Each structure stands twice: as C-alpha cells, then as structure tokens.
Amino acid sequence: MIDLIDKTKDELQKEMVLKGMPRFRANQIFKWVNSGIEEIDEMMNLPKNLRERLKENYSINRIKLVKRYEDGKDSTRKFLFSLNDGNIIETVLMKYTYGYSLCISSQAGCRMGCSFCASTIDGLDRDLTAGEMVDQISSVEKLEGIRISNIVIMGSGEPLDNFENTIRFIKIVNDKDGLNKGQRHISISTCGLVPEIYKLGELGLQVNLSVSLHAPNDELRRQLMPIAKKYTLKDLMQACEFYYEKTSRKITFEYAMIKNVNDSDDMAKQLALLLKPLRNSMVNLIPVNEIEERNYKKSNDDSIVRFSKILTEAGVSNTVRRKLGTEIDAACGQLRRGFVK
Ligand code: SAH
C-alpha cells in the first residue's frame, strides 16, 4: 500500500490523472490527508466509488504515539512514536516566546558516528520516509492542540544523508494546501556532508542551514566527528559560502562546548579566524549534554562566557543556547533509536 502522507501534491496530481481522475481530486485528497484524517473514508467530498478505488492502492499510514514525557522545569515535551516496522523515533516540542518549535527526526538511528551523540550509538536502522517526517508535525499538532511555527530537523539522523526524502518533506509541509509551513521557518542541521550542501544550495530553497562544527581545526574535528575524515573544514567552509551565495540565508554553526576538549581561549581564537571570512553566519554555543555512554563533561559557565566574548570581540556573532528538556533526555544529542519488542 502506498502511504498518502508521503506524497507531494504534484505527485498526487500525476497519479490521480493516470487513474483517470480529474486533477482537482488530487488537491482534495492532499488537503484531507494533511488535515490529519486517519481513514480514506473520511474524505467527505470524494464520491464513494473514488474512495473505494483509492483504497485499492493507497492508505493513510500514521505514526503512533507510544509515550509522552514533559520536562517539569521548562515544559519541553518529548514524544516517542512507533513506525509500522516497530522502530521508535523521538520528536521534541519546545515552547519559545515566539511560538512552538518542533525538533523532528530524519532517520531511525544515525550512521555518522559523532562521538558525543546518543543518536548514533546503535547505528542507522533506516531512513524515514517523507511521510513519517511530516506526520511527526501533524501528530504533535493534533495531540497538543497547537500550531507549530518552527521546524528544526535536528532530532536523530542526518537529514542530508536522507536527502531526497528530506526535500520531499519540505515540499509537502511547505504546500499552502498542506501544513503551510514557510521555508524560512524550517532549519536543516547537518554534520557537514559537503556534496549535499552544494546540492541543497542548487535547489535555492529558503530553508535555514545549521552546520554542526564542534571544532575549529581538522585535527580535533576528526577526533570528534568521523565525517571530518572525509571533508576538511576548508571544503566545508567553501560549501557554506556557496550555500550563502545561492540562498542569501544566514548559516548557523553549532558548537557543543566540551570541557577541556574544545573550550579553550585558543580554540575560540581559531574558531573566530575560521568563521570571520564568511559573510553572514553565527555560532550557537551549546554546553554539551552529557550522555551515559560517553565521558564528555560540559564546559564551566565561565569558560563559555569567555569563549563567547572572544568570538564577539573578533566580530563573530554568537549566542549561548538555552538548554531545554534535559530532565527527560530530550536535549541535543540525547535522542536515540528504540525498538518495541
Ligand atoms: N545530524 C545532524 C542533525 C542532528 S542535530 C547534525 O549533526 O547536525 C543535533 C545537534 O545536536 C547537532 O548539532 C549535534 O552535533 C548536536 N549534538 C549532538 N550530541 C550532542 C550533545 N551530547 N550535546 C550537545 N549537542 C549535541
């Protein structure tokens, strides 16, 4: 059965025309599916015979809530959803003054192997479909009775390692007849897959790009992130420059502050030198979230302040990220893959 949630409006139009249905039927179907219905029979303005024909090849395949957690301190919510093959993924909802932001997963697990991140510990099981990504948003909006204003693809997985589905996801949620989320309200975070950053730049979408940097030089970055053995910082910076040229979107660099690893004054100076030539970028300093399996400790508050000050004085804009959801293991790098037995 083909999952209707996985389809862009264009794809549906083509498929319905092939079935001999008029194009406007595809628009109706697309609207219904993205309004959150569970069954094809709920498509009230579709004649019964069309619904029956649709049911021959298509279904609506929603992800299922397994558990919901709420952080007592900051009211961040984490949802465990099961996919139809038994995989469990995590989605995190954060409340900011401007509205709700949802952190969605793009893969069940991850194969990037970053040494500080829990998502990669059991490796990659599989890519999520575009529909499974879309449904994280629809499900949370429905469960919580809210509208999500920002989407960050920063849950488990590497979105650019699941490139085609991530792009389809953007097309589906961006559609005015669908969830209608503006591209400027969607952020893709990558550990730095250089060829895919170029591919994304070529598409000229208006989405935000976040790059997980975590080290200001290749030697340290290679110790922390295996992807750095494949692409140097020079390659990565060139790709970022290209992305900016094509899209004019500001690029955010994520930098997890790890005690005695990447938080010295010298590292801050190196980072400033690295980023200074980029025209429009900013650094997000994140005190590393400690995970059980690893021995990394977060930097002291005063080293973070010093680090931030060195960047600012060198003209590199930066913020220290507020930590949300630590009580429920919902913070950056704490999401992991599960399995229902
Ligand atoms: N694979 C993508 C998407 C994951 S986003 C990427 O690497 O960007 C998750 C963000 O949290 C990334 O910036 C990641 O590097 C960061 N992160 C991972 N583990 C972390 C940890 N333990 N503490 C703080 N940030 C972490």
Image: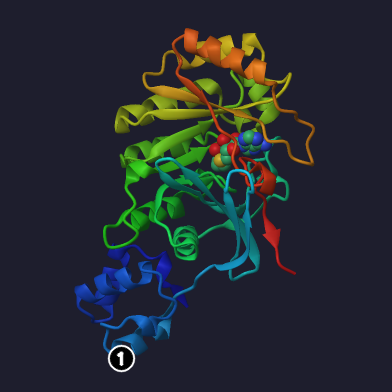
Residue at the image position 63 percent from the left and 9 percent from the top: 265
Residue 304 is drawn in which quadrant? top right
| Quadrant including the C terminus | bottom right
Residue at the image position 49 percent from the left and 46 percent from the top: 95
Residue 260 is drawn in which quadrant? top right
Q: Residue type at mark 1: give it.
A: Lys
Task: Judge from the rendering whether residue 283 lies leftward or rightward of residue 44; answer left or right.
Answer: right
- Residue at the extreme front of the image, as rendered: 73
Residue, disc 1: 48
Residue 28 visible in the current orientation: yes
SS at circle 1: helix
The percent position of residue 181, horizontal first and vertical second, equals 34, 52
The percent position of residue 157, horizontal first and vertical second, equals 58, 48
Ligand 1 - quadrant of the structure image: top right
Depth check, front residue: 14 or 316: 316
Neighbours of disc 1 within 10 Å: few (<14), some (14-19), many (20+): few
**Is 271 situated above or below 254?**
above
Depth check, front residue: 45 or 49: 45
Residue at the image position 52 percent from the left and 36 percent from the top: 193
Residue at the image position 62 percent from the left and 42 percent from the top: 331
Q: Is mark 1 within 8 Å of ligand 1?
A: no
